Image (cartoon, helix red, strand yellow):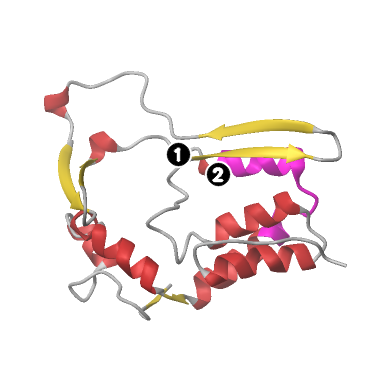
């Protein structure tokens, strides 16, 4: 009997985690599968080029561990006038917030090394099995939900700022809308 509950921001994310649980994976296997699967439909919130944290409790050892795989900024800083660092103001309805974009706003991602650290310490299934649902989701594509469309609309000024990101996120002149399929 499989025990577990999965909550996620998109159905395919939850489905990936549930699939791994049904296949004999533990909760940590399911978390990694969900994190990887969310990279296609929830690209506004998660990215291989990002970072994160995972607080893990292992009931079998009664051990709690914090996995910190956030991004790292360069050790040697360049002068502000020598970097591409611009601000974009995003409207969240009741509030607006300034975000910084450009090459000067980038950092070294920690997401992938973090996933492998969690996998090495806590997972049961091989990583190749854990990534299978995410690969399938990325190849088949997913339909954008109203929530994802809302997030895309908020960050549209960032996604359409440069030609390369416009080509990726707004090839038809606008960011994905509800029911648009992203691959």
Q: Residue 5 — which label?
A: none
Q: Is residue 177 above or below residue 71?
A: below
**Circles 1, 2 touching at the beta carbon (< 8 Å):** yes
Residue 48 to residue 151: above or below? above
Q: Is residue 42 left or right of residue 164?
A: right
Using the rendered image of the protein, determine whether residue 117 is visible from the camera's viewpoint: no
Q: Quadrant of residue 74?
A: top left
Residue 24 is situated, as x and y percent measured from the top left of the image, at 82, 62
Q: Is residue 124 magenta?
A: yes
- Which disc number belongs to residue 112? 2
Give residue 13's position: percent from left, percent from top.
Answer: 56, 65
Image-based side of 3 in relation to 13, left or right:
right
Give the quarter of the image for residue 41.
bottom left
**Which quarter of the image is occupied by the N terminus?**
bottom right
Identify which residue is drawn at 51% across, 73% down.
139
Query: Foreground: 81 or 69?
Result: 69
Q: Which residue is mark 1?
A: 109
Q: Residue at x 59, y 61 (%)?
A: 7
Q: Secondary structure at mark 2?
A: helix
Q: How many residues crowd around disc 2 within 10 Å: few (fewer than 14), some, or many (20 or more)?
A: some
Judge whether 139 appears above or below 69 on screen: below
Residue 68 in the image, given as x and y percentages of width and height: 56, 32
Question: Residue 160 location in percent, x, y?
Answer: 19, 60
Query: Which secondary structure is most common in the magenta stretch?
Result: helix
The segment highlighted magenta reads 112-130
Q: Could you tell whether 109 is left or right of 167 in the image?
A: right
Q: In the rendered structure, does residue 6 fall within the stretch colored magenta?
A: no
Q: Quadrant of the C terminus?
A: bottom left
């Amino acid at each position: 009997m499989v025990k577990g509950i999965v909550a996620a921001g998109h159905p395919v994310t939850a489905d990936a985690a549930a699939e791994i649980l049904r296949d004999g994976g533990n909760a940590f296997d399911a978390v990694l599968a969900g994190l990887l699967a969310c990279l296609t439909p929830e690209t506004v919130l998660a990215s291989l080029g990002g970072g994160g944290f995972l607080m893990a409790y292992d009931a079998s050892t009664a051990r709690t561990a914090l996995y910190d795989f956030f991004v790292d900024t360069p050790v040697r800083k360049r002068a502000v006038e020598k970097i591409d660092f611009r601000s974009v103001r995003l409207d969240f309805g009741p509030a607006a917030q300034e975000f910084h974009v450009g090459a000067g706003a980038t950092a070294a991602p920690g997401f992938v090394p973090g996933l492998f650290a969690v996998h090495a310490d806590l997972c049961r299934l091989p990583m190749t099995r854990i990534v299978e649902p995410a690969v399938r989701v990325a190849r088949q594509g997913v339909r954008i939900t109203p929530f994802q469309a809302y997030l895309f609309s908020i960050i549209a000024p960032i996604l359409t700022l440069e030609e390369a990101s416009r080509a990726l996120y707004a090839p038809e002149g606008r960011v994905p809308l509800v029911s648009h399929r992203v691959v």
